[in-house]
Image (spheres, helix red, strand yellow):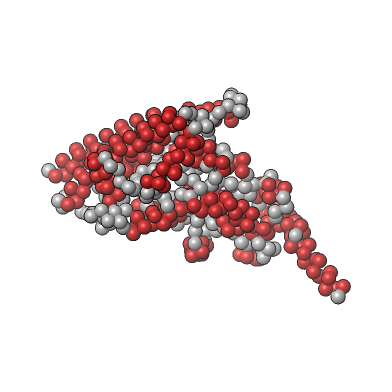
Amino acid sequence: MRHLLTVIVLGLVMSGAAGASICVDCHSNVTPNIVSAWKLSKHFENDIDCSTCHGAEHTTADDVSEVRLPTPEVCAKCHEDKVVQFSKGKHAAAWQVTTAMPTGHALPMNMDGTMRGCEGCHQLGLKSKDDITKLRADGIMYGNASCDACHTRHAFSATEARQPQACETCHMGFDHAQWEMYSSSKHGVRYLLKQNGTMPADASAPTCQTCHMQDGNHEVRTAWGFLGVRLPLPEDEQWHADQLTIMQTLGLLDRNGNPTAKLDMVKANDVARLTQSQFDLSRNKMIAACGQCHSESFARDRLAKGDDMIREVDHLMAEAIRDVNGLYDDGVLPKPESFAFALARLSPIELRLYDMHLQYRKLAFQGMFHANPDYAFWHGWNEMVRGLADIRSMEKELRK
């Protein structure tokens, strides 16, 4: 009996502090910075050891395959409310969205499926067990946890994740230059001056999280969403027709205006506002965020200006689409199988249209919403005007 009790006690010790010690002793040599990062974490302070997230099956160099890579479900054991919030927002849909976006189907072979192309950021999204199994079969042993995209391993610092730079890795560049817009806007400049000590710590200056994650809510979404399309379509006849053209070309509606399977995917992942009440809910949350520094009337006026910019660039975009569609209909250009122009980067005129949609249209309205006139005008609206002029010039030459 005494021998049995001794075995049980030893087992408990090995699975607790002694088990953690084994991990630390080994990994202090193998991956020392992982250990030092963990020792800086709240996990370390609260006795959350390696086995809590990675399981206890891996104990030697011979059973590395037994280590458990944490998923959001593992994080939810302690942070259930944050994981539930995250799962309702657009970040959670990032993995599904990248498989639906046209750009995801044309990556160079050495980037596709390696987490080095679009997946490098879109790995943030929730994945099914089949998705994770396939990733592991392809030799990709990360991108499961989602939470670690912002709370980077192994410190998992909330302080780090609250800084605007935490968003910079993904929200920058060609088709989503939010970091460039924010950091060079008055909002971003003031916060960066706080960070370097030029302005006092209690000076008002919003971060990305101030507007998009009020009160730490991880359900991140915006009224217009990433693509700047919504339902119901606007009452304004011209804007209604322009948004219809854009949604048809994106494959969300067919040529007759009927919903498609892709729209069902958008609905399922809630990545666009498809009712007026959904739009109003997101818009009112943003007005409340603005209201921390500005009057409600000012906030509503500024956001309405962003809406107006979407209307302006939608018309330029739709006109360019109609010109290229006319070339398809008249047999001047071969029509893409999916009838989605963004998949048809086969000729200079289609490439110009692709850039107008994926880059300049977004920069115009996102520049307005991020209080950055340079991006709204020069990088956005001005390039849309130039793009339409180029397309009409190329169309004329092609028809000759």
Q: Find residue 182 and report its horizontal and vertical position in percent.
A: 47, 34
Residue in view at x 36 percent, y 43 percent: 228
Q: Find residue 262 and report its horizontal and vertical position in percent.
A: 35, 56
Q: Quadrant of the N terminus?
A: bottom right
Q: Find residue 150 and report its horizontal and vertical position in percent.
A: 55, 46
Name the residue nearer the viewer: 292 or 187.
292
Residue in view at x 64 percent, y 59 percent: 54
In this rendering, position of residue 359 left or right of residue 221: left
Q: Quadrant of residue 338?
A: bottom left
- Above or below, 189 relative to 171: above
Residue in view at x 36 percent, y 32 percent: 305
Residue positioned most to the left:
400
In this rendering, position of residue 227 left or right of residue 68: left
Residue positioned most to the bottom:
1
In this rendering, position of residue 111 left or right of residue 243: right
Residue 98 shows up from this direction: no
- Above or below, 85 relative to 301: below
Name the residue nearer the viewer: 352 or 144.
144
